[in-house]
Image (spheres, coloured by chain):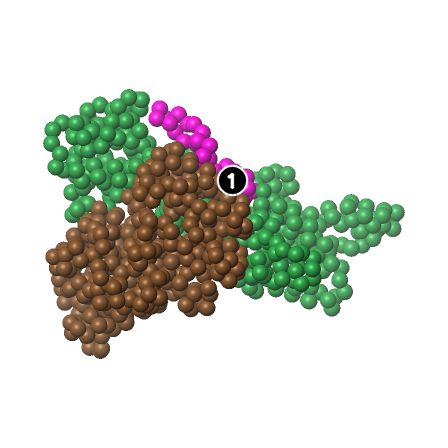
C-alpha cells in the first residue's frame, strides 16, 4: 500500500546523508544501503531511524527509494551487482522473495530474538517493521455516528448513500464475509470453498448499486471529503493523515479491521550483512519505534514500543489493543494462490 | 539506377525508423499473446513425458519421475542463480489452475529430501498430483506457443481433453467488454457527428472575420492535456461540484444528482475530447465545396432541405467519413477517461490491457487483449472500406 501512498517517490534516488568525503562504490567497501518507500514516510524514517543510526555508530548509510515489486529485487540479485542491503518490503514480496531465495534468512539472535516482537511480525526472512490496516471510515461532519462495523457498512437502510470499496477481490471479499457474520478466524476457511466465494459475492450483490470503487490509496479520503460516499474502506494512515493535515473530522471504525505488515529484509549475499542486522536491531528497539506513530499512525512491532505513547496517539494505531481486537491478518498465502481466479471472477461480477 | 530506386532510397530511412520503433516492438509485444516461455525451460522432461498423454486418467509413472527430476534440477538452479524460474512457471500455471502458485514451489522444496518412488513421493507432498488437473495445465503451457490467452479473451478455454469449451458464466467477461467498447465508441462517434456537423457548417458559412474565432474555439481543447480535461470534468460533475451546486442554487433539483461514475459522464468527456477530430475534417470538405451547386439546386426548385440532402451532404461525405473513422478508432482506445469518470461497468478493453500489464503483470493476457482490440479496429476499418471506400476519405 505504501507504494501508492507515498506520492513523489522519485525524489530521492540515492541520497548521501553523511557529511562529505569520497566513498567506495560496490565491492565490500560500500556503505550500508537502506531502501524504503519514499515520500513523507521516508522523511519520518530519516529523522527517527537513519540519522540517529549514523550518529550512534559513526558509520554511513545510503538511502534509496523504490516502488515495490518482487521483479525489481529479482533483477538486483540476478545482475550480480546488487547494491541494496536492507529493504522494506510488503508482505507479499516477503513471501515470494523468501521462497525464491532473494533474502538472507533472518538471524534472530543478532536482533534480540523472536520473542522481542509481536507474533505476526516474525517470519523466516524478515522482521515486521510497521503494521497497518484496512478500516471503515466515514465523515463525522456529515454522519456524526457512522457505521460501527462491516454489517452496518452494508446496511443501506440505516446509512443511505454510496459506499467506497477498493476495486479488486483482495480485502473486499473478506469484508463481505465479515459483514455476513463470518468470524474473523473462519474467513479464509470459508473463502477457500466455492460456496464461500459465492456467499461473499451474494453479500456484495446486496449493495452493488451503492458501491463506488477506488484504486489508489489517496482516493478514500477524497471521496469522503467531497461527500461522494457516506462511508468507505481505507488505509488507516491515510484517514488519520487527512484529519491531522487537512483539518478533516473523519471517524474510524476499527471493528474487524484487516491488517498487514511491511518488513525489513536483508538482501541475499550482501557484504554488509552484519551491519544490516545491526541496523535492523537499532531501528526495532521499542524506544526507537515509539517515535514513529506520533508522526505517522502505523503500528510498531516490537513489544513494549507503544507503552509510553499518549492516549491520543494510541487511539489511531491498529496495534492499540482495543483497535486490534477482532482484527484479521490478510493472508498472503491465500491470495498468492487464488488471486488469478478471483480477479477474473471479481472483474466479471463488477462489470455486470 | 532508376528513379524508382532513388525514390526508395529517400524513403528508406523513414521506413527503417517505422520498422524499428513501431512495427517491431508492437509485433514483439503482440507475439507474447501466444508465446509460452515460462514452463518448458523449468519442466522440459515433464512436458515431453506428457506429450502423448490422453488427458483423462492420471499420467504414467514416467511423468511423475520426470516431474521430480525437473523440479530438483530447477530448484538447484534457482538457488544458485536466484532467477526465480520455478516461481515464474508457477505463476503462469496458476492462471490455468488456481493453487499452482504454492503447489509448485512447495513440491520443488520438498522433493529434494523425498525418498522412494517418485509417484509416492509426489502424492505424499500433495494429493493434488493425484488428479489430472495440474498435469493438464502443465501440458497446455508446455509451449512453445499456445492459444490459452487468445481463447481466454474470447471467453473460451480448453478442457482436459483439449477441446474448446465456453468459460463458466461467472468468468466470462471479455466478449461483453468488447461489445461495450464498440457500443461506447459508436455512441461517442454519433454524438460527435450530431454536434460536429452543424458546427462545421456554421464555421464554413460564417462571415470571414468570425472564422478565426470559431476555429480557435474548436482548437482550444487541443491545448490542454487529456488528463487535465478529464480531471476538470470530475471537479464539475462531483456530488458537491459546480454543476450540482448551480442546479441546486437555481432550485432545479433539491438533491445533488449522481453525475459522476456513470456512462453519461464518460460519454460527455469523450465527446468533449474527440469533437475537434470530427469538426475539422468536415469543415475541410465543406470549405472545398462549390457553393454554387446547392444554390443551383435551389434555383431549380429544390427546397433548402432537399438541396442539403441531395447536394451539400453527399459532397461533404468524404469529410464525414474521415471524421467518423478518426473519432471511432480513437474512442476505442480510451483508457483514462472511463477509468476516472466511469463506474465499474463503463470500463472498456484498454482498461483491462492496463489491468493485466501493470496490476497482475500478465503480459500474455495484455497482449491477447491488444490483439482483440486491433482485430476489432481492423474489421471496422475494412467494413468501412467495403461500404464507403477509402477513395472518399479525404481530410481536406
Please give the letter of the chain rendered in brown.
A
Tell me if residue B19 can be seen: no
**Label 1 environment density (alpha carbons within 10 Å; few <14, some 14–19, many ≥20):** few
Identify the image quadrant of residue A55.
Answer: bottom left
Tell me if residue A300 can be seen: yes
Q: Where does the image place residue B259, in percent across and percent down from the top left?
A: 59, 53
Is residue B172 inside the magenta stretch? yes
Subunit of label 1 = A
A350 to the left or right of B49: right
Residue at figure coordinates x 40%, y 46% from the top left: A175
Q: Where does the image place residue B358, in percent across and percent down from the top left?
A: 39, 50
Please give the letter of the chain rendered in green.
B
Viewer-proximal residue among A62 and A290: A290
Q: Which residue bears the numbered disc 1? A: A352
Is residue A323 inside the magenta stretch? no
Q: Where does the image place residue B82, in percent across and percent down from the top left?
A: 20, 49
> Which SS class for mark 1?
loop
Residue at figure coordinates x 14%, y 56% from the top left: A113
Q: Which residues are magenta?
A: B153-182
A216 to the left or right of A32: right
Number of numbered discs visible in the structure rendering: 1
Identify the image quadrant of residue B164.
Answer: top left
Q: Quadrant of the C terminus of chain B?
A: bottom right
Viewer-proximal residue among A349 and A306: A306
Q: Where does the image place residue B60, in percent across and percent down from the top left?
A: 22, 23
Viewer-proximal residue among B346 and A242: A242
* Farthest residue, direction bottom: A20
Residue at figure coordinates x 67%, y 63% from the top left: B249
Residue at figure coordinates x 34%, y 44% from the top left: A184
A143 to the left or right of A111: right
Amino acid at each position: 500500500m505504501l507504494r501508492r501512498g507515498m506520492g513523489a517517490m522519485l525524489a530521492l534516488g540515492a541520497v548521501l546523508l553523511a557529511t562529505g568525503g569520497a566513498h567506495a562504490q560496490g565491492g565490500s567497501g560500500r556503505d550500508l544501503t537502506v531502501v524504503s518507500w519514499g515520500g513523507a514516510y521516508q522523511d519520518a524514517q530519516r529523522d527517527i531511524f537513519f540519522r540517529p543510526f549514523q550518529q550512534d555508530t559513526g558509520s554511513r548509510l545510503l538511502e534509496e527509494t523504490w516502488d515495490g515489486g518482487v521483479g525489481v529485487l529479482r533483477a538486483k540479485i540476478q545482475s550480480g551487482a546488487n547494491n541494496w542491503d536492507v529493504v522494506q518490503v510488503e508482505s507479499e514480496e516477503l513471501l515470494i522473495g523468501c521462497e525464491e531465495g532473494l533474502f538472507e534468512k533472518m538471524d534472530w539472535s543478532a536482533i534480540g530474538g523472536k520473542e522481542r516482537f509481536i507474533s505476526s511480525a516474525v517470519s523466516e526472512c524478515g522482521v515486521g517493521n510497521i503494521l497497518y490496516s484496512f478500516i471503515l471510515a466515514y465523515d463525522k461532519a456529515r454522519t456524526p455516528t457512522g457505521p460501527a462495523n462491516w454489517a452496518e457498512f452494508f446496511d443501506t437502510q440505516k446509512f443511505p448513500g454510496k459506499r467506497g470499496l477498493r476495486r479488486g477481490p483482495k480485502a473486499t471479499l473478506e469484508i463481505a464475509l465479515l459483514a455476513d457474520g463470518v468470524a474473523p478466524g473462519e474467513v479464509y476457511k470459508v473463502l477457500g470453498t466455492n460456496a464461500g466465494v459465492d456467499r461473499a459475492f451474494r453479500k456484495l450483490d446486496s449493495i452493488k448499486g451503492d458501491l463506488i470503487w477506488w484504486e489508489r490509496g489517496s482516493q478514500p479520503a477524497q471521496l469522503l471529503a467531497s461527500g461522494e460516499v457516506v462511508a468507505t474502506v481505507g488505509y488507516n494512515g491515510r484517514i488519520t493523515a487527512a484529519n491531522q493535515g487537512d483539518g478533516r473530522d473523519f471517524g474510524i471504525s476499527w471493528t474487524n479491521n484487516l491488517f498487514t505488515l511491511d518488513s525489513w529484509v536483508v538482501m541475499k549475499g550482501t557484504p554488509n550483512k552484519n551491519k544490516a542486522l545491526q541496523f535492523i536491531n537499532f531501528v526495532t528497539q521499542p524506544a526507537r519505534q515509539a517515535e514513529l506513530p506520533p508522526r505517522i499512525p502505523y503500528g510498531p512491532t516490537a513489544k513494549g514500543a507503544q507503552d509510553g505513547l499518549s492516549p491520543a496517539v494510541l487511539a489511531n494505531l491498529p496495534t492499540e489493543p482495543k483497535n486490534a481486537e477482532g482484527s484479521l491478518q490478510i493472508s498472503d498465502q491465500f491470495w498468492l494462490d487464488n488471486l488469478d481466479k478471483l480477479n477474473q471472477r471479481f472483474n466479471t461480477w463488477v462489470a455486470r | 539506377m532508376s528513379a524508382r530506386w532513388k525514390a526508395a532510397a529517400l524513403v528508406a530511412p523513414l521506413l527503417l525508423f517505422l520498422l524499428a520503433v513501431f512495427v517491431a516492438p508492437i509485433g514483439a509485444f503482440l507475439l507474447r499473446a501466444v508465446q509460452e516461455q515460462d514452463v518448458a525451460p523449468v519442466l522440459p522432461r515433464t512436458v515431453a513425458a506428457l506429450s502423448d498423454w490422453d488427458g483423462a486418467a492420471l499420467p504414467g509413472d514416467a511423468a511423475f519421475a520426470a516431474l521430480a527430476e525437473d523440479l530438483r534440477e530447477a530448484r538447484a538452479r534457482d538457488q544458485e542463480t536466484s532467477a526465480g524460474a520455478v516461481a515464474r512457471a508457477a505463476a503462469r500455471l496458476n492462471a490455468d489452475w488456481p493453487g499452482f502458485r504454492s503447489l509448485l514451489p512447495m513440491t520443488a522444496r520438498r522433493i529434494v529430501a523425498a525418498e522412494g518412488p517418485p509417484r509416492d513421493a509426489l502424492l505424499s507432498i500433495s494429493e493434488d498430483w493425484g488428479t489430472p488437473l495440474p498435469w493438464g495445465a502443465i501440458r497446455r503451457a508446455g509451449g512453445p506457443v499456445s492459444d490459452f490467452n487468445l481463447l481466454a479473451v474470447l471467453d473460451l478455454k480448453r478442457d482436459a481433453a483439449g477441446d474448446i469449451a465456453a468459460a463458466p458464466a461467472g468468468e466470462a467477461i471479455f466478449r461483453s467488454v468488447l461489445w461495450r467498447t464498440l457500443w461506447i465508441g459508436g455512441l461517442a462517434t454519433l454524438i460527435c457527428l450530431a454536434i460536429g456537423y452543424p458546427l462545421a457548417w456554421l464555421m464554413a458559412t460564417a462571415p470571414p472575420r468570425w472564422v478565426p474565432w470559431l476555429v480557435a474555439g474548436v482548437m482550444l481543447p487541443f491545448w490542454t492535456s487529456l488528463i487535465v480535461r478529464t480531471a476538470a470534468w470530475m471537479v464539475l460533475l462531483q456530488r458537491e461540484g459546480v454543476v450540482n451546486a448551480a442546479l441546486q442554487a437555481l432550485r432545479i433539483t433539491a438533491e445533488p444528482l449522481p453525475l459522476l461514475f456513470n456512462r453519461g459522464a464518460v460519454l460527455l468527456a469523450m465527446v468533449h475530447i474527440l469533437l475537434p477530430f470530427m469538426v475539422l475534417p468536415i469543415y475541410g470538405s465543406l470549405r472545398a465545396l462549390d457553393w454554387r451547386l446547392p444554390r443551383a439546386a435551389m434555383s431549380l426548385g429544390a427546397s433548402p432541405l432537399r438541396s442539403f440532402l441531395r447536394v451539400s451532404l453527399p459532397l461533404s461525405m468524404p469529410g464525414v467519413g474521415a471524421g467518423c473513422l478518426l473519432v471511432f478508432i480513437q474512442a476505442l482506445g480510451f483508457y483514462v477517461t472511463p477509468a476516472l469518470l466511469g463506474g465499474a461497468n463503463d470500463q472498456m478493453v484498454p482498461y483491462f490491457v492496463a489491468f493485466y500489464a501493470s496490476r497482475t503483470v500478465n503480459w500474455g493476457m495484455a497482449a491477447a487483449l491488444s490483439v482483440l482490440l486491433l482485430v476489432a479496429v481492423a474489421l471496422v476499418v475494412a467494413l468501412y472500406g467495403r461500404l464507403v471506400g477509402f477513395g472518399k476519405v479525404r481530410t481536406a
